[in-house]
Image: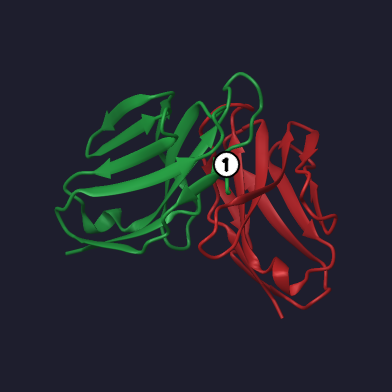
Chain colours: A red, B green
Amino acid sequence: DAMVIQNPRYQVTQFGKPVTLSCSQTLNHNVMYWYQQKSSQAPKLLFHYYDKDFNNEADTPDNFQSRRPNTSFCFLDIRSPGLGDAAMYLCATSREQGVTEQFFGPGTRLTVL
Amino acid sequence: QKEVEQDPGPLSVPEGAIVSLNCTYSNSAFQYFMWYRQYSRKGPELLMYTYSSGNKEDGRFTAQVDKSSKYISLFIRDSQPSDSATYLCAMTGMKTSYDKVIFGPGTSLSVIP
């Protein structure tokens, strides 16, 4: 089945220790998104890629970076995680920009000790 | 004022009840309105979307948009325990150009057998 896969599902890191979250998709979609979702809050868009074009949200901290080496994979790098970065990180894809349906992965739950 | 507001619940109803979930928003530029369902430890999945004002029905689900009041609703008829999830409303502007999707924080629903 075509899908969005995130690894790992649970990640524990130490304060200040870099961490990388992974997302892959078999949908061959052009757009990939990273969202941060804290408990009982709306998913917050961090950035998205349209093909190789990177689009950063204005309020995304510099601590968060992303890479998309090919159509299928996208990575979220948190350079120096703080306690406030503990959250669920959701990867999503859509066929094109401006369409309404996004397909989400199951998320990676990040804990910062 | 947040762009999209949603009562977080939790909402608990008996099986078979009619459920009404609601969102209000402030941005009159929103044209596309969506409802996503998020099961525990999973990513959101699209349930329904509507364009502009009006109603849309899909099985037991009816989405309603009132742009004049900036108010959207999702009705679930004959609710089932399998409907227990968090329901997030989401909305965006013009479909032909990139507008990011703004999510509400979600309403947690429990349907009790």
Residue highlighted by disc 1: B102
Please state, as top left, top right, bottom left or bottom right, where the C terminus of chain A lies in the image: bottom right
Residue B15 in the image: above or below residue B68: below
Q: Is residue A1 visible?
A: no
Q: Position of residue B77 (x, y in %)?
A: 19, 44
Q: Quarter of the image holding residue B107?
A: bottom left
Residue B31 placement, left or right of A94: left
Residue A69 placement, left or right of B63: right
Residue type at mark 1 is Ile
Residue A5 placement, left or right of A30: left
Residue A68 placement, left or right of B89: right
Q: Is residue A51 visible?
A: yes
Residue plotted at (44% across, 24% down): B51
Looking at the image, which residue sits at the far top? B96
Q: Quarter of the image holding residue A56?
A: top right
Q: Position of residue A46 (x, y in %)?
A: 71, 49
Residue plotted at (63% across, 35% down): B100
Residue plotted at (49% across, 49% down): B5
Q: Nearer the viewer, residue B7 or B83?
A: B7
Q: Chain of mark 1?
A: B
